[in-house]
Image: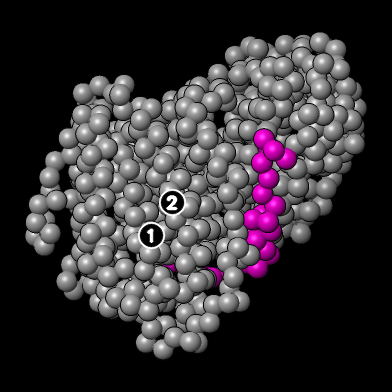
Amino acid sequence: MLVDKERTEAYVPEHRYPLPLRSAMPEVWALWQRAKTLEWDPQTDIPWEELRPERYSAEQRLAAQMYWSRRTWGEYGAISESPALLLRFSLERRLPDLQFFFTMRTMEEGRHAEASWLMAERLGRYFPQPQNPPTAGAVGTHGVRRMAFDPETSLEGIFASLVCAAEEILIDVFKATVHKATNPAVRRLMELILRDEVRHIAFGWQCLDAWAPSFTPETVRNIEVAVTTMIEQVEFRGYRNLWLAIEGGSATPAEIEADRISCEAGLGGSTPEDEMAIFPEFLTKIRKRMAPYGVNLPLFDHPRLGKV
Amino acid sequence: MSETADHAARLLRAYQAQEKRFVERRFPLEFAPEVPALRELYSQAKGFHWNPETDIAWDRFDAARYAQATREAARRTWSRRAWGVYPGLTESTALLIRFCLESGSLGMDAKLFLSFRPAEEAKHLEVCHMLAERLGGYEPDPGEPGLARVSNHPFAQAALDCDVPVEAYIAALGALDDQLDLNLYLSHLHQAKDEVVRAALRLIAGDRARHVAFAWAFLGSRVPALDARGRAAVIDTVRDLLANVILAGYRNTWLLPEKSREPWLAAEEETARQGLGASTPAQERSVLRATIAQVRERFATWKLDLPRVDHAELGVV
């Protein structure tokens, strides 16, 4: 069954040797080493006894349950989709540093998914799906698996859009709102996720910086298209925050309001005012960060953010 | 496009085609435990994490106290072991993706467990590399086509092949191959005399034991519900792996074709003799026979009959 398919080349033969294992990207290797010293367990490293959901109103609890449920779906994407990048690194025989680090990233994203699920559960209820199924298209996938397996999609574009930009906005919002999480359990969880995500982004930028000298005009164009697509088709469809969804999609008012209510209760999330401030700054930052690569990102029109 | 890039593109297209054969239904996305034993193994993985850099007393490893020939042998042994560990990074990653593609509502215990496994494999790989380096240098290439072929199988592609039931894949790669691998590590640990090597082997074996427990617990949760076709696929796949991969020398150098065995076999014998983390062919032969008997017995509890396999050197196993 397995070997017959191998012999008949129904499975494409893999060339594995030589198999270098020595680090060739010291900064990425340092991230792998650092990640191993910062492992944590959602079950034991969050002060769950301080969550005390009974202190909050039913409306606040419901909003926070929705917020943390949606976070769970987003984190799940990083264990169901992003690991395809590790396969790509291996198939393209990329440097060992990338492969070592990415195994840790998958582990950490699994932990974030579990932690977000636990938070929703312990706030009273985890929602296993959006209230209106079509929203699943917006919040369920950013499509990285398909891109990772597509040889026509440049790895640099995937990194710029999903490993750097998509993660960057995520932590920008976390950084800007963690102080509002007055609940100790929520705040600790946000801090722990943030600590991991900072490494994930550093990894993305370090790779892009290392590859930049070999970028061709086509690579630069690929990055521009990929980042633009991520902004328009992922962020502006409400993947991370439904309030940003340009067309509103099929999300219910309760789902759209959940982030604000949860945030105002100190249970995690962001308000529209936060997004209004953070999103333009995020765009300014990545434009500046990518400019040395020759990347020129367009202005984006958003009905609530304006031209950003 | 260079030949390497062209081949990588061909491989990616193969994975892409496999992925497209699945219709992912992500929602409802369930997280509650379904198989408590699997969730417990995931919890253990979180609790028993370790770091090759800091949890092994490398400063107490004195390679200079071994003869040059011994160091040369041991660096070869640990290099070959690294080649055997490396596929685990991609195979367990592909298996994780497979579970996610199959269902959002089922299998979260396995998904969470598998989200940890590639990092554990990477730690084992790092240990093998660190030992090989300290013994004189990691060898990145078998240098002999026969050995390269035997130690290189596209099992990550098989993990994403919807024609191979996930139970069959885990029975072959987990219950048989991982079990043999674990039993070999335990044998090497039993023979090892160097305290640093013993610590390394003990840490790796601890993770491996969990990986094997995962395979058996998963099969225990799924095999009883399999229909005749699914049961046949399990047996066929395990038999295939045993006859054509394991007995061809995937894990055991002494089973390699004669012309591919050296210098690796002599290196393992010297490594075993000096207690640097290997077993002799005779010891490995016992481990292999015991493992096959163990797997056969456990399958029999599910009324799965693993056929005997005839091998030129070992006879009927």
Q: Is A146 contained in the magenta span?
A: no
Parent chain of label 1: B
| Mark 1, secondary structure of its residue | helix
Q: Which mark is residue B261?
A: none
Q: Quadrant of the N terminus of chain A?
A: top left
- The chain carrying label 2 is B
Is A82 or A39 nearer to us in this picture? A39
Q: Residue B7 location, x and y as percent?
A: 38, 56
Instruction: Report whether residue A128 is seen.
Output: yes
Image: A65 above or below B113: above
Q: Which residues are magenta?
A: A18-45
Residue A23 falls within the magenta-colored stretch:
yes
**B132 displayed left or right of A215:** left
Q: Amino acid at mark 1?
A: Tyr
Image position, residue A137 (x, y; %): 60, 22
Q: Residue at x 21, y 54 (%)?
A: B289
Per the image, the residue denoted by label 2 is B208
Residue B277: quadrant of the picture = bottom left
For the residues labelled 2 and 1, the Cα–Cα distance comes to: 9 Å
Residue at the spot 64% in from the left edge and 24% down from the top edge: A138
Along the line of sight, which residue is nearer the eye, B224 or A20? B224
Q: Earlier in the sequence, mark 2 or mark 1?
A: 1
Q: Quadrant of residue A28?
A: bottom right
Residue A265: x %, y % from top left? 88, 22
- Mark 1: give few (<14), some (14-19) or many (20+) Cα within 10 Å: many
Give the residue pinned by disc 1. Answer: B185
Position of A58 compared to A104: left or right?
A: right
- Quarter of the picture containing the C terminus of chain A is top right
Name which residue lies at 89% across and 23% down: A264
> In the rendered structure, are the residues bearing label 2 and label 1 in contact, judged by CB atoms less than 8 Å apart?
yes
